[in-house]
Image (cartoon, grey):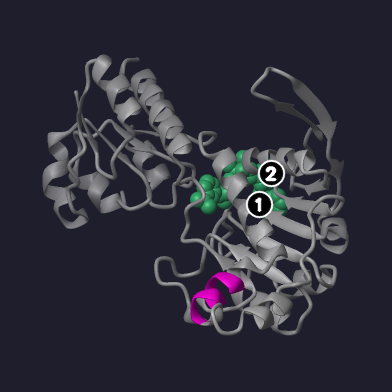
Amino acid sequence: MKILANDGIDAVGKKILEDAGFTVDTNNIPQDQLKDRLNEYDAITVRSATKIRKDLIDACSNIKLIGRGGVGMDNIDVDYARSKGIAVVNTPAASSLSVAELVFAHFFTGVRFLQDSNREMPQRGDTAFNELKKNYAKGIELRGKTLGILGFGRIGREAAKIAYGLGMNVMAYDLFEFNPETEISFADNQKIKFKVQVASKEEVLKNADFITLHVPAVDGKAVIGADELAMMKKGSSLVNCARGGVVDEQALMDSLNAGHISFAGLDVFDNEPTPQKSILSHAKISLSPHIGAATNEAQERIGVELAQRIIEELKK
Ligand SMILES: NC(=O)c1ccc[n+]([C@@H]2O[C@H](COP(=O)([O-])OP(=O)(O)OC[C@H]3O[C@@H](n4cnc5c(N)ncnc54)[C@H](O)[C@@H]3O)[C@@H](O)[C@H]2O)c1
């Protein structure tokens, strides 16, 4: 069987598939040529770049499986594919830790103004060193502060573990009831169990010093808009490594400009891949271009998990 890994696949995952007897082609076929060429394959894997829409599914009756390396399947018409008997698989857990670590990269950046000093130092670091030193003098520590997690799923839980390790208090809200007990495993096989504080959304907004969002994309309605930002503690901060649209970008900038929340970290944006310039140039926003899952470790885990899911499905 032939698999087209159109957005690439980690070498370890590719080898697992080849050892199981599959041929894996990692040469990218441009989106506009897929309709004519995808039928040469039995399955396709994608990340977020390639779109698998209804018309492509209709044009390629040979395809038995669509694999998504990663979590979100917004680029695939999943229900339609399944209605046509095509298996659709993804790798939901493989990148959770990488996303959670990026959340703290943004928090550590924001509390020491690195998002701004990294922009200012190359311009003025040689002539206005002491002025910049004064501007960035009032940093704060994370230890002892409260992290509020909205969405206590896979990534939310990983964020809780990091926060606990940093000596933060952790409170979490989820739409559904969840087990607050969480376990951290260390490299030397030590394990530590702890419980996060179960809270309502309002309690998180009102009490957390740092808020991180780990909810799925919601059609049209932001989980954090002007009302929620107004409820947040003055001087608190917010990181969105979930999906664009989960935070109302204009309301976020209004709150930052009014000096209500102190900084934000964003990995995801409205209108990706062309986010608005005002967000990109805001001095109080730490930025990354949707790289939450983009670590070597996560990509390897994604490749391995995807290969295993494909083998399970196609060798049934
Ligand atoms: N930045 C990146 O590169 C990157 C990478 C992977 C995943 N993500 C995104 O991270 C988000 C979380 O992923 P996950 O793997 O933890 O998902 P998950 O399904 O494990 O957890 C999501 C949790 O959110 C809860 N939830 C849903 N709507 C909610 C709401 N309105 N308020 C509170 N809780 C709500 C669900 O009950 C669930 O427990 C997703 O949006 C995913 O697309 C981003």
Amino acid type at image mark 2: Ala
SS at badge 2? helix
Q: Is the Cβ of the residue at disc 2 closer than 8 Å to that at disc 1?
A: yes
- What span is colored magenta in the figure? 116-123
Q: Is residue 119 magenta?
A: yes
Q: Earlier in the sequence, mark 2 or mark 1?
A: 1
* Percent of width and height locating residue 272: 43, 66
Disc 1 residue crowd, few under 14, some 14–19, many 20+, Cα 10 Å: some
- Left or right of residue 109, residue 161 in this image: right
Residue 67 pos. (x, y %): 36, 36
The amino acid on which the numbered mark 1 sits, given as a three-letter code, is: Phe
Residue 225 on the magenta span: no
Query: Disc 1 marks which residue?
Result: 104
Question: Which percent across, then down, holds residue 314?
Answer: 31, 21
Kindly identify which numbered label has been placed on residue 80: none
Which corner quadrant of the image does residue 185 belong to? top right
* Ligand 1 under 8 Å from disc 2 Cβ: no
Residue 134 in the image: above or below residue 80:
below
Is any part of residue 26 visible from this angle?
Answer: yes
Query: Quick one: 51 or 301, which is closer to the camera?
Result: 301
Mostly what secondary structure, the magenta segment? helix
| Mark whose residue sits in front, 2 or 1 | 1
Counting the numbered discs, the total is 2
Horizontal and vertical percent position of residue 308? 40, 22
Residue carrying label 2: 159
The residue positioned 78% from the left and 49% from the top of the image is 173
Q: Quadrant of the C terminus?
A: top left
Real-space Cα separation, disc 2 to disc 1, in angstroms: 8 Å
Asked which quadrant contains residue 241, the reply is bottom right
* Tag 1 secondary structure: helix
**Can residue 215 be seen?**
no
- For the N terminus, give its image quadrant: top left
